[in-house]
Image (tube, coloured by chain):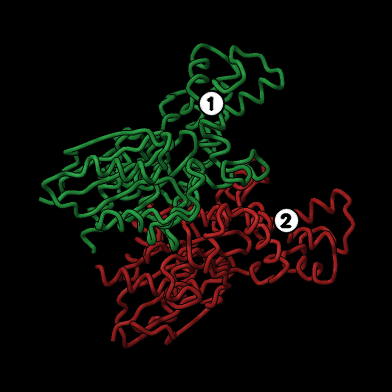
Chain colours: A red, B green
């Protein structure tokens, strides 16, 4: 029997799984740390794939969810903040050469969008907007049942839209992007700056200041922590209103750790969204949902991709 | 022989034409003023269509390019600034009832995008971003050879993305939209406000202050006029950079009167775009073009639409 291998490459972990066609339950599943002494990230990917390669089956194709920006046509990673040594790194061609199987590489957030649409919260919808909010902000769009990839395969970078032209610096080096205003990193940076400016809070500045710690403090009544989430939610609402005007989706799905902070983020988000949408028709029968696939979104999105691409080939 | 009628409903003129299938040269073509004493806009549309209705041919379908937002599925105009009496106006159903032919209604900017893609500057491209800059700013997107319409048919309102959250009021009632910063109206308003604040200029405040008059003054060396175009171009660059990150098109087409101001707008626009794009890969082989179809873009877009829809039906 033939099978697919999919890989989800994250900043801290690499996951891989083996699937039979038409089945979303993996026959093998493994997770390792992205970094380890004495081996490169690419060597760790090779070793992980080898370790789950089934003995008595043919691998029809390999799908990889990778941080981007990347070119899905060539399989080349242009640049990625968490793996700075990969500039113009031909991940797809190198894996194909090593394993002798077709390899499809796509942006991890794009694949999470595809996964949620095919197997998760977006099932049955024809127009899906997906945003993942964690350290950064990524996105993916399905419009008329078609994944938007664009001319160079670089579409859907929804964290890198400008929301405040003179706003804070983004991880990409530009100013005022959604990611610089509403990601976990942005929330922590805002609190850090306010603490430095003397704002009173139960929080302490420093490396331990994460979006999770701030969420806990906010739930405990800390006013600065609450305002940090309110600010992020407000900017998120401004951006999502623009996305509604642009794409007019029937569902907006939120994935990523920060989206699990619940009302802290979503109450100000929804108020901001309602205030900013220029015609109430955009909100009619619009579903706002959280992602259903959890940590497997990338693996399942890559599975949807390889099945789609492999049929075409 | 059967033929198609298309109508382009503008703020000042209504155009209509008759086409044979597969031919973009109209067999009849007529233009009237949108407003006249003693008749409603709808009555003028009826009279215009009747006046060009061919005697010896069957009309297979009628296509209408209308200002929006509107619902292309139902043919209902939700609201439109230039015809305020049309709130939830069932333009499509009323025309179908009157003429007994299938009627397809779409947003005028969306249809101009479709027209430019099928018959104009965007031919051969699979990923097209179209922006029309005149009194307002409208848009349309073709991605993977598919016109983006969205769940309620309200996609592509690219003039209504937020570029400056606390910026000037937009015609739609919300703040800081691209239209409120880079349209002809926005350029004139900026000059008017600067004049009121005492900035020196050859221009005089008042109703005669249009984007065209300001362009003339800018070419004559007026510093305020030049800065008004520079400001609009800068904001346009910020927005288009976001659109590249979102859609990754292979061509950006500019239509509308203000886009004919040439370097005045496009020099600052291009500088701003280059500064704001977060990865140079978006600009590789990207074409920036002006619209090729002129005043007929709406009529030809409606022709493309009726031919497409009529085949499906």
Q: Which residue is mark 1?
A: B229
Q: Is residue A190 visible?
A: yes
Q: Are marks 2 and 1 on the same chain?
A: no
Is B141 drawn above or below residue A290 in the view shown? above
* B135 on left or right of B163: left
Q: Is residue A42 visible?
A: no
* A259 on left or right of B43: right
Q: Picture quarter containing residue B262?
A: top left
Give the x, y percent position of residue A64: 42, 68
Within 10 Å of disc 2 (Cα), the crowding (few <14, some 14-19, many 20+) is many
Tell me what residue is drawn at x 51 percent, y 37 percent.
B237
In the depicted view, which residue is nearer to us: A280 or A46? A280
The label number, if any, that marks residue A14 in the structure image: none
Subunit of label 1: B
The label number, if any, that marks residue A231 in the structure image: 2
Q: CA distance from mark 2 to mark 1?
A: 32 Å
Give the x, y percent position of residue A194: 82, 52
Is A48 drawn above or below residue B73 in the view shown? below
């Amino acid at each position: 029997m033939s099978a697919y291998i999919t890989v989800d490459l994250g900043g801290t972990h690499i996951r891989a799984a083996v699937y039979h066609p038409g089945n979303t339950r993996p026959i093998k599943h493994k997770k390792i740390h992205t970094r380890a002494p004495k081996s490169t990230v690419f060597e760790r990917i090779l070793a992980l794939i080898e370790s789950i390669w089934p003995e008595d089956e043919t691998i029809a194709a390999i799908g990889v969810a990778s941080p981007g920006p990347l070119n899905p046509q060539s399989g080349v990673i242009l640049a990625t903040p968490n793996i700075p040594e990969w500039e113009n790194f031909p991940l797809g061609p190198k894996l194909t050469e090593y394993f002798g199987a077709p390899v499809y590489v796509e942006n991890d957030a794009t694949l999470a969008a595809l996964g949620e649409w095919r197997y998760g919260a977006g099932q049955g919808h024809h127009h899906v907007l997906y945003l993942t909010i964690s350290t950064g902000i990524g996105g993916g769009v399905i419009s008329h049942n078609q994944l938007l990839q664009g001319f160079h395969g670089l579409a859907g970078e929804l964290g890198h839209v400008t929301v405040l032209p003179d706003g804070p610096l983004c991880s990409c080096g530009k100013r005022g992007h959604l990611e610089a205003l509403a990601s976990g990193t942005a929330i922590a940076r805002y609190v850090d700056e306010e603490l430095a400016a003397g704002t009173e809070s139960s929080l302490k500045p420093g490396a331990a200041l994460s979006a999770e710690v701030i969420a806990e403090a906010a739930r405990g009544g800390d006013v600065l922590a609450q305002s940090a989430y309110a600010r992020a939610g407000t900017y998120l609402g401004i951006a999502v209103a623009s996305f509604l005007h642009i794409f007019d989706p029937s569902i907006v799905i939120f994935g990523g750790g920060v989206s699990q902070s619940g009302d802290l983020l979503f109450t100000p988000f929804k108020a901001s969204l309602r205030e900013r949408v220029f015609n109430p028709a955009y909100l009619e029968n619009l579903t706002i949902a959280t992602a259903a696939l959890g940590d497997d979104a990338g693996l399942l999105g890559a599975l949807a991709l390889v099945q789609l691409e492999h049929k075409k080939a």
